[in-house]
Image (spheres, rainbow, N blue to C red):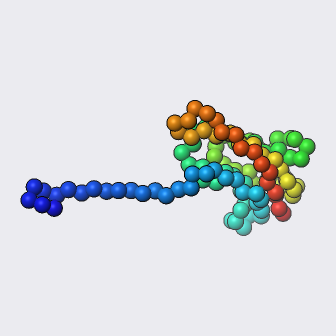
Amino acid sequence: TNHCGVAIKKISIDERVCDLMFPSGFTPNHDGINDIFKILNAYNLTYYHCVIFNRWGKKVFESGDSQKGWDGMLKGIPADAGTYAWTCNYRKPGNTTTTHLKGTVTLLR
């Protein structure tokens, strides 16, 4: 404040992790901890597509919504415990290039 008036400046700092990651395992036992397999730190994406496959290469889950993850169910039945392969394509604002990630996740029962 001075004799000319009042001036206010606001600065907002929003700290986020920039790297997108997937967990290496999940336990869909409805205890509220690690029940869903989904991408972590997925904010501000302009494109997202994730597919999960079983050990025989059959698609068990697919989503274009980064907030939606796999609950370990397959056609209404709990999927077998084991290792599943996943692929993910995503794009961030300002990028015209799609980034491709792939890996495995262990479903524990």
Question: Going 70% across and 65% down the picture, which residue do you hit?
Answer: 33
The answer to whether residue 77 is left or right of residue 91 is right
Q: Quadrant of residue 44?
A: top right
Residue 91 appears in the figure: yes
| Quadrant of the rendering where the N terminus is positioned | bottom left
Residue farthest along the bottom direction in this orientation: 31
Q: Is residue 62 above or below residue 41?
A: above
Q: Nearer the viewer, residue 106 or 1?
A: 1
Q: Nearer the viewer, residue 58 or 43?
A: 43
Label count reads 0
The answer to whether residue 49 is left or right of residue 56 is left
The answer to whether residue 2 is left or right of residue 75 is left
Q: Nearer the viewer, residue 53 or 72?
A: 53
| Quadrant of the rendering where the C terminus is positioned | bottom right
Q: x%, y% of residue 55?
A: 89, 47
Q: x%, y% of residue 77?
A: 84, 52
Residue 67 appears in the figure: no
Question: Going 56% across and 55% down the picture, which residue do you hit?
Answer: 17
Q: x%, y% of residue 2?
A: 12, 60
Residue farthest along the top direction in this orientation: 96
Q: Quadrant of residue 102?
A: top right
Residue farthest along the right direction in this orientation: 56
Question: Going 72% across and 60% down the picture, which residue do you hit?
Answer: 35
Q: x%, y% of residue 101?
A: 71, 44
Question: Going 82% across and 57% down the picture, which residue do you hit?
Answer: 106
Q: Nearer the viewer, residue 32 or 12?
A: 12
